[in-house]
Amino acid sequence: MANLNETVRSSGIDFPGHLHTRQSLQYAQEFKFCDTDTVIITYPKSGTTWMQEILTLIYSDGNTLPAKTIPNWLRTPWIEHYYCENVLVNKTDHRILTTHLPYHFLAKPLKQSNAKVIYVARNPKDVVVSFYYFHKMANFLPEPGTFGEFLEKFITGEVNYGSWFEHIKEWESHRNEFNFLFITYEELMKDLRKSVIRLCNFLEHPLLPEAVDTIVRHCTFANMKENKMINYTLIPNEIMNHERGKFMRKGVVGDWKEHFTQEQKQAFEKIFQEKMNDSNIVLNCAL
Ligand code: A3P
């Protein structure tokens, strides 16, 4: 399925037609979650792939074989992607699932289970930079224009996958409805070992210190960048143009400083304050 120039619109949000269909979005909204499922929820470019790799390794007790031999979209599929139903045939137990969908798409089916939910958030200023470069390489996303133009669309939520602000606020404000862990990209970056242990505790999946060491070693940016099963180099150039950029691009905190003008920074921080004022989310977008 190519459909590179198609968009599927649902609840006022555009999704790339290369990966989504009306049926696949419907499938996600009626998804049968199991109590043993672990669901990674992110707005794009927030550390999804990183969490997919970490969880794969936690559940394999630090055995790197699955991470090195199975592409991430097969071992931790996005439930809204058109191929998900086939990937999950005969797989009902201990699944690692991924989604970029907003809360209101999934609330009903997810509430019917006791699945573990992990929300990964990232400083939106770094998200927008990462998303901008991803638009340049991903041929299933529209041309982003200049960074300034893309930033404006990101702020108003007129980008694929909708508003970052709505996504995080909606999920976080409903956290008590789920078995929910909120973790940030910055936290993973600051202390990966501590984050892995925090995840193990939440998942009730204790690991020996050696297994934690292996995970920390395997999940550095430098190592993941070389892993074909996660760096998207298996995807042909017509779909992701690897000459126009790398999926595993920089992997740092604060790259926004190289891209935002002083005016853009001030305007963004003001909007952030206004929009996030009514939420409990602890995320310092000025850092
Ligand atoms: P950059 O574009 O800023 O480099 P997602 O998986 O949600 O699409 O997010 C992709 C972003 O996460 C990219 O950010 C990518 O480089 C970064 N990333 C992936 N694995 C990482 C790791 N192990 N360490 C740090 N950053 C990582």
Image: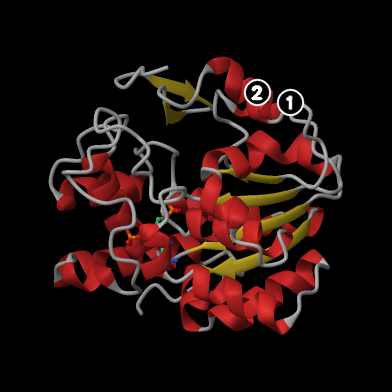
| Quadrant holding the N terminus | top left
* CB contact under 8 Å: marks 1 and 2: yes
Q: What residue does disc 1 label? A: 89
Please report the residue visible at 81 percent of the width from the left and 49 percent of the height from the top.
115
Foreground pick, 210 / 188: 210
Q: What residue does disc 2 label? A: 86
Q: Quadrant of ligand 1?
A: bottom left
Q: Is residue 162 above or below residue 283?
A: above
Q: Is residue 19 above or below residue 248?
A: above
**Image coloring type:** secondary structure
Please report the residue visible at 65 percent of the width from the left and 38 percent of the height from the top.
104
Task: Answer left or right for 146 relative to 179.
Answer: left
Task: Answer left or right for 63 relative to 250.
Answer: right
Residue 152 appearing in the image: yes
Compute the Cα span from label 1 to label 2: 5 Å
SS of the residue under disc 2? helix
Q: Is mark 2 within 8 Å of ligand 1?
A: no
Q: Quadrant of residue 207?
A: bottom right
Image position, residue 279 (x, y; %): 58, 65
Residue 271 appearing in the image: no
Q: Residues within 10 Å of mark 1 (few under 14, many from 20)?
A: few
Q: Quadrant of residue 73?
A: top right
Q: Is mark 1 within 8 Å of ligand 1?
A: no
Q: Quadrant of residue 273?
A: bottom left
Image position, residue 282 (x, y; %): 55, 74
Q: Residues within 10 Å of mark 2 (few under 14, many from 20)?
A: few
Please report the residue visible at 59 percent of the width from the left and 22 percent of the height from the top.
24
Three-letter code, disc 1: Val
Foreground pick, 250 / 169: 250
Foreground pick, 203 / 271: 203
| Quadrant holding the C terminus | bottom left
Three-letter code, disc 2: Asn
